[in-house]
Amino acid sequence: MKPVAPGPVRGVRRFDIDRVAAETTSAVDDAVAIEEPLEIRLAHSGSDGKRAEQSISVTMRTPGNDEELAAGFLFTEGIVRQAADIERIGPCGPAAANGLINVVRVELAAGVAVDLDRLERHFYTSSSCGVCGKSSLDAVAVQGRYDIHAVDIRWSAACLGGLPADLRAQQAVFEETGGLHASGLFDHSGKIVLTREDVGRHNALDKLIGHALMQGMVPLEQYGIVVSGRASFELLQKAMMAGVPMLAAVGAPSSLAVELARQFGITLVGFLKPGRFNIYAGPDRVVDA
């Protein structure tokens, strides 16, 4: 897979601000990352055979790659199992006609069953959601479909150390605003072949996985994922759903992320920087460490 060009900078809004430095104040123009709501609507066959449509999620995100975000979200939450489950995806509502996309409609193929009870439950979105660790891990075990323990791939310590700088170099919006998370997909040589940015770290990863899903790349057995922030349980869950054998984070992992990685065979790297990082799970996939 060839590297994907970042394209024109999107997701930036400029404001007139007052900047204070060295006890002086000056009026300047500043770039700020855009944050707007995205509603994901799901159209599917109901139990009576008729088509039903319902809103399943509203997430705060940076506009751009919204179809990928919706597809990745549905896949990593276990609502769809494969790209063929999605018949079409696109913007809808009055705003779409004006070029503003804040609602995306996902139409499932005929005959694709939807777990309505699951849609009514809260998704795991933060460390304060109140879901106990054992219940969360059990839920993930039911959803997962790939045996990551069996994936035979290795990366050198040297190539891992170069990932943060390579990821940063591909963050076009972060370069202007300093306010976005990023997820990058890297191959066996450590080359980042795809990046996605968003104000939400989980959205950035859903965009990345959504793209891979729609391109027929899942399971991502021959790739790793690098994230710009910390490694949370939620990010490990999404990586596990996509069959990713390694997740490397610039920041720290959470305890539940470490437990999940060890249980499902994911190599987890944290505090990643050139020449120095911690391996919390799956050390056999890192050579020359």
Image: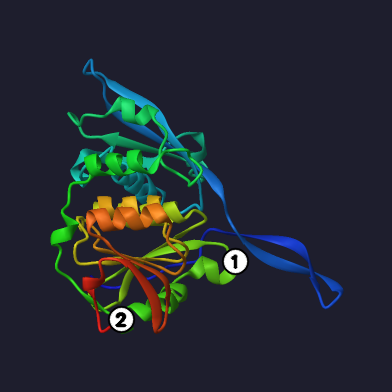
Few, some or many residues within 10 Å of mark 1 (<14, 14–19, 20+): some
Q: Which mark is residue 177?
A: 1
Query: Which of the two residues, 63 or 279, is positioned nearer the viewer here?
Result: 279
Place of residue 285 in the rendered image (x, y in percent of width and height, measured from the top left): 22, 72
Q: Closer to the N terminus: mark 2 or mark 1?
A: 2
Which residue does the image show at 54% across and 72% down from the upper left?
A: 175
Q: Classify the position of the C terminus by image quarter.
A: bottom left
Q: Is residue 94 left or right of residue 32?
A: left
Q: Is residue 83 left or right of residue 157?
A: left
Amino acid at dot 2: Ala
Compared to 273, does 184 lie above or below? Answer: above
Which residue does the image show at 31% across and 26% down from the upper left?
A: 116
In which quadrant of the rendered view does residue 154 lie? bottom left
Q: Which residue is mark 2?
A: 157
Place of residue 26 in the rendered image (x, y in percent of width and height, measured from the top left): 83, 71
Compared to 284, does 148 lie above or below? Answer: above
Q: CA distance from mark 2 to mark 1?
A: 31 Å
Q: Is residue 23 visible?
A: yes
Amino acid at dot 1: Thr
Q: Closer to us: mark 2 or mark 1?
A: 2
Q: Which mark is residue 117?
A: none
